[in-house]
Image (spheres, rainbow, N blue to C red):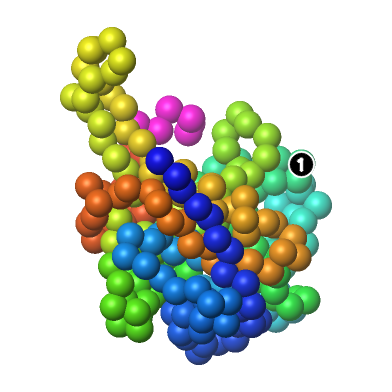
Amino acid sequence: MEITLTGVEGLPLVSEGDDIAALIVDALKSSNMELLDGDIVVIAETLVAKAEGNTVDLRRIEPSSKALEIASRTGKDPRLVEAILEESSEILKVGHDFIVSETRHGFVCANAGIDESNVEEGLATPLPEDPDGSARRILGALQELTGREMAVIISDTQGRPFREGAVGVAVGVAGISPVWDRKGELDLYGRSLQTTRVAVADELAAAASLVMGQADEGVPAVIVRGYPWGHLRATGSARELLRPRELDVFRD
């Protein structure tokens, strides 16, 4: 098997109302490239949030007393803390420089997924309001423009319990099942797998993040080519990656 990761270069800075699918297709044409059947397009959530106008102007926020209290414990800007509170359904842990919360989507991550990087000074981008819906709209537009069968993953960069560093994860999915359940298959010694479920969408998002980078690389979209995902073709939803609360052994 050979899998290639190709960054979509030449994308402009995105503004509210921009057509992400058209921008990707045009950028690829400028590089003498095109989308093919079986491609998976991984798109950074910041790009989607900006195109959808889903940004927060921190300068206009009036922090609440709760935000001020948490800010004093974390050293974070009280206005950012207030934005985190507004995007969260529950605050899980507050430390000397971090806030871990559950977002309104059900994702458990730092700062409710709010990102201050790669956006204008004073602004921040929360996760898209409906990441799966955003992925479906972009997928539909890409298929209409190209006539190709493909999948779309919207990715974010998040930390993980008990491990240093951040990795790309899928927050929105369209056209592919994000989880590959391999229960019942045989291992090398003929034993039947009992619990093996592979978070394929997260693995693809993490691989794409190697090309996207985290600083000034300017590559918010990556084409994954060569991964055989035909058996995973489905409407898909990133919510399938969320562990049910009753099985969450890490939460108090």
In the picture, measured across the screen, residue 199 lies left or right of residue 48, that is left
Q: Residue at x 75, y 45 (%)?
A: 97
Residue 45 can be seen, yes or no? no
Magenta stretch mostly in which secondary structure? Answer: loop
Task: Work out which quarter of the rendered image holds the N terminus and state it.
Answer: top left
Position of residue 222 relative to residue 56, above or below, is: above
Whole-percent x and y of residue 120?
A: 73, 78
Query: How many numbered markers are drawn?
Result: 1
Q: Residue at x 40, y 52 (%)?
A: 226
Extreme residue in the bottom direction: 17
Q: Residue at x 30, y 49 (%)?
A: 229
Image quarter of residue 136: bottom left
Q: Which residues are magenta?
A: 246-252
Whole-percent x and y of residue 85?
A: 58, 60
Residue at which label 1 appears: 96
Question: The residue under label 1 is which amino acid type?
Answer: His
Dot 1 alpha-carbon crowd within 10 angstroms: few under 14, some 14 to 19, many 20 or more: few
Residue 217 can be seen, yes or no? yes
Whole-percent x and y of residue 39?
A: 38, 61
